[in-house]
Image (cartoon, rainbow, N blue to C red):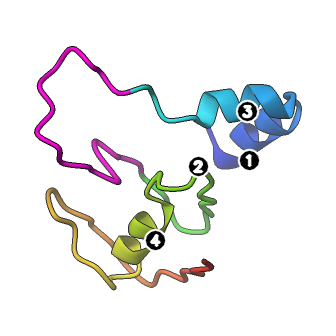
Amino acid sequence: MGMHHLLGELAGMPWRTVRRMLRPPEPDRSSEDDGTFWALENASFDLHAGETLGVIGENGAGKSVLLKILARITPPTEGTATIRGRVGAMLEV
């Protein structure tokens, strides 16, 4: 499914539905909590030449962390970020 198709589907939905879909899942209270907070966990996506990624979400969801990793400002704590070519990141706080 292409990015344009996905954006078209989102544009046709009521804003409340889109917000509910993008809201981070509630934390699993049944597992042990060691107090560690991960801004990004199990994030995975592919972008191909010419595609654009827009990142939206609640405060503290990891948007700025993701953009800093993709712009090579901050290395990932775990895992990898494979980037080929240039990344034009616009960070706005």
Magenta span: predominant SS is loop
Q: Which mark is residue 52?
A: none
Residue under numbered circle 4? 67
Mark 1–mark 3 Cα distance, whole angstroms, equals: 16 Å
Callout 2–callout 3 Cβ contact below 8 Å:
no
Please state which amino acid type lies under the numbered disc 2: Glu
Mark 2–mark 1 Cα distance, whole angstroms, equals: 23 Å
Q: Is tag 1's residue or tag 4's residue first in the polypeptide sequence? A: 1
Instruction: Please identify, in this view, whether the residue under mark 1 or under mark 3 is nearer the observer.
Output: 3
Q: Is tag 3's residue or tag 4's residue first in the polypeptide sequence? A: 3
Q: Is disc 4 placed on a helix, strand or loop?
A: helix
Q: Which residues are magenta?
A: 27-45
Instruction: Please identify, in this view, whether the residue under mark 1 or under mark 4 is nearer the observer.
Output: 4
Within-10-Å neighbours for mark 1: few <14, some 14–19, many 20+: few
Is residue 66 rendered to the left or right of residue 88?
Answer: left
Please state which amino acid type lies under the numbered disc 4: Leu
Please state which amino acid type lies under the numbered disc 3: Val
Residue reaching furthest to the top: 30
Residue under numbered circle 3? 18
Which residue is found at the position 11% from the left and 25% from the top? Answer: 32
Residue 20 higher or lower than 76, as above or below = above
Is 90 inside the magenta-drawn segment? no
Residue 88, position as x, y percentages in the image: 54, 83
Mark 2–mark 4 Cα distance, whole angstroms, equals: 15 Å
Q: Is disc 3 placed on a helix, strand or loop?
A: helix
Residue under numbered circle 2? 58
